[in-house]
Amino acid sequence: MRTQRQQLPSPLWGGVRGGGREALIASMIQMRAMSDSTSFADVFPAATEAQWRARVDAVLKGAPFEKLQGRSYDGLTISPLYTRLLEDRPRAVKAGEPGWARLARVDNPDPAGANKQALADLENGATGLHLVCAGSMGAYGFGLPAGRQALEQALEGVALDVGLAFELDLSPQSIDSARHLADLIAEAGGDGANVTFGHDPLGQMAISSVANADLAAAAKLAMAFNGRAFVADGRAVNGAGGSEAQELAFVVASALAYLRALEGVGADLSVARGKIGFRLSADADEILGVAKLRALRRLWARVEEACGLTAAPIHIHAETSFRMMSRRDPWVNILRATVACFSAGLGGADAVTVLPFTQALGLPDDFARRIARNTQAVLLEESSLGRVADPAAGAGSFETLTDALCEAAWALVQETEKASGLHNALASGAFQAKVATVQAARARAIAHRKDPITGTSEFPNIAEAPVEVLAPMPAAAPASALALAPHRDAQAFEALRDRADAQAAEKGARRSVFLANLGPIAAFTARSMFAKNFFEAGGIVAPGNEGFADEASLAEAFKASGAAFACICSSDPVYEDWGQKAARALAKAGARHIYLAGRPGAAEAAWKEAGVSGFIFAGCDVVAVLDEALRLA
């Protein structure tokens, strides 16, 4: 029990001056007694939500509170403050020991090279392997070749009889690899109980031109496996730009279809459910990431309840999202992957694969793999994330968003069921159309930098050094019209940078924009830095300067710069004072295109008459402006 709040002695050290050593000891005893009965929070007066809202309203100065709220791509409200839920909440059921299996990717097309990497990973902290076959959902341009010989060579020297965790990524061409893996484990004396063999006909149907999935044949094949024969994999939805609820609905609808297929070949439901594993993407959105994994357990428990089963633990494998990876400034991917792994662990993942930070560039080398491996080691061993089961339970934000995701995803599952199941929804393209709608909204938000990408669309490194990979990323094969084709968030900006690099190689110099900084440094710095980041996100260099006090020095500096176009940067008062005069001076000096950093407002016509032909500001279509800038003669 906490005592009532007590006031700290004041002044604390006053007794030392007045009473010497005895007073100091008395003060220390008083503090010790207080610390034994009072929490640190009790020292401060309690704050109410009403008090917080009053402070917020004062800062907003009449703007609506909704300005502080965000929206997910499912339309869920993300509030700036949540209250703790005091009532008892159901806790997610997690299988196995605390923590999660630390998986290392085995995706090198050379089986001997893959074997060397796998052994190094297992010797240095990995507790399982993610076996990636060429052409599978998680191959990302690489992967093991089909056939027992390649798999056997890749696993040479790996102890297959000690219960290592294995996740298998299958493709239609490597479907027999599941049986080969099961045979290799059995021959070594293992039982395969800790293996997800990766049969996912609906997932393959979603990412390829396969028109139909033979679930009955897959179910008959699955009955021969001791471990999780099927995997309900949502990475296709995440990779194609879908929302959290869409990914959850895809996974639940897939698992439900596999459950029915297994029942159709004679499996008891209590046995059939144990033959299904689950796989999700984890991205850099921590709160929604944790809520998504928690929501999946609740959703599947609801399916089990509808089937007359008591909910049992399920196995969730999480892989850090390929969609969030960037080719430019790839070092930022280390931070993204850390947040994603953190979210997956707190959300209750049973196994996690961290993509190496150079995955979007090509086949990662040993250094990148080491960083990925140690990311998990730090979070588990040094941060002890695996010691608490469902740490998000009771937290207002996580509980509210978990409930909201469950509701949104369940509505999509019901809609899919009414359309005769996920197979038909994929065959007709109905499900893909929903994902495409979200992807279009996501692309707009990225282009307008409402969804910023650090190092790519924001704070780009125009002079970054290349990062090594074992092999460059091969060109992607064209996807069919109905496929959920993977699309990384950074691709639009990366394409601009590629064009700028090609122009620089052709002409021997990088295209540049002259920053026409008007007035004192304090006046132009904010917009000048904005413009520099803006243009360099498209590979257009924007050298800084100390600013200009008059039109003559401005025009002279522009001519000396050799730039083809300019961007005027300063504060609104300076713009009103001589901004349009500066624009005319730049035009007279030969600037073929002049931008203004800031919204033109009511003076747009006057600015254009002065020679300004483009405006850059927070919220504009950055991709469109940069595309035009790269096309200018």
Image: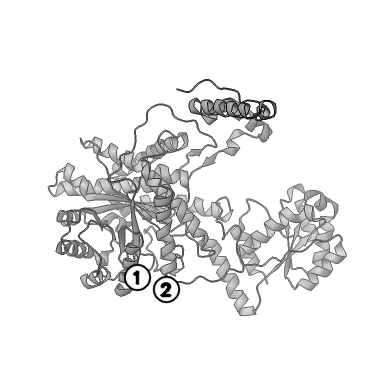
The residue positioned 45% from the left and 55% from the top of the image is 337
Q: Nearer the viewer, residue 383 or 573?
A: 383
Residue 254 seen in render: yes
The residue positioned 58% from the left and 53% from the top of the image is 449
| Residue at image mark 1 | 108
* Quadrant in the picture for the N terminus: top left
- The spot of residue 313 in percent (x, y) is 26, 42
- The disc, 2 or 1, on the residue closer to the chain's N-terminal end is 1
Name the disc covering residue 470, or none: 2
Choose top left, top right, bottom left or bottom right for residue 322.
bottom left
Q: Is residue 550 left or right of residue 242?
A: right
Callouts 2 and 1 close, C-beta under 8 Å: yes
The residue positioned 46% from the left and 50% from the top of the image is 438
Specify the amino acid type for callout 2.
Leu
Q: Height in image: 153 above or below 215?
A: below
- The spot of residue 109 in percent (x, y) is 33, 72
Choose top left, top right, bottom left or bottom right for residue 388.
top left
Q: Is residue 306 left or right of residue 296?
A: left
- The spot of residue 119 in percent (x, y) is 31, 67
Query: Disc 2 on helix, strand or loop?
Result: loop
* Quadrant in the picture for the C terminus: bottom right
